[in-house]
Amino acid sequence: MGASGGFTVGLHLIAAFELSTALGDVWHWTWIILKVAIGIGLVIFVHELGHFLVAKLCGVKCEKFYLGFDVPIKLGPIVFPRTLGKFRWGETEYGIGIIPLGGYVKMLGQDDNPANA
């Protein structure tokens, strides 16, 4: 192996090190973002659980308890599902909506349409 061969191997090692460092940074920041998202999700869950428990203690029936919003999303011919998952237990439907920007508890008789106000 000549002088240029050793130089090429050295460049490959440097490039491999830089790539592994860059990927390490990506995983590091991905993990941080995931932890923040889980933390915010827990805060939202506890907040909505407060609404749910007070409604139950006051005798108000709750139709839905959701993390995220279960609104229909349509992009051209593509229609996305409203939820990532849901199940019914008793009178309440529990689920995780497709838009992870909050949560809600829908109580019996609640109408959020401003046109009906």
Image (cartoon, grey):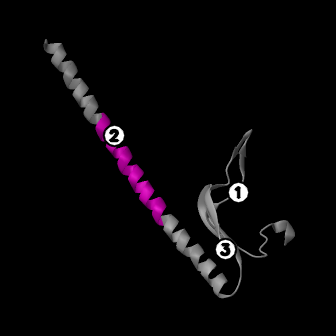
The span from disc 3 to disc 2 (Cα, nearest Å) is: 50 Å
Q: Quadrant of the C terminus?
A: bottom right
Q: Answer with mark 2 or mark 1, whichever residue precedes in sequence.
A: 2
Residue lying at the far front of the rendered structure: 90
Q: Position of residue 45 (x, y in %)?
A: 54, 70
Residue 24 forms part of the magenta stretch: yes
Extent of the magenta region: 19-39
User: Is any part of residue 96 visible from this angle?
Assistant: no
Residue lying at the far top of the rendered structure: 2
Query: Residue at label 1?
Result: 71
Query: Residue at label 2?
Result: 22
Residue at position x 35%, y 50% from top? 28
Depth check, mark 2 against mark 1: the one in front is 1
Q: Answer with mark 3 or mark 2, whichever residue precedes in sequence.
A: 2
Residue 83: name its quadrant.
Answer: bottom right
Q: Is residue 85 above or below residue 60?
A: above
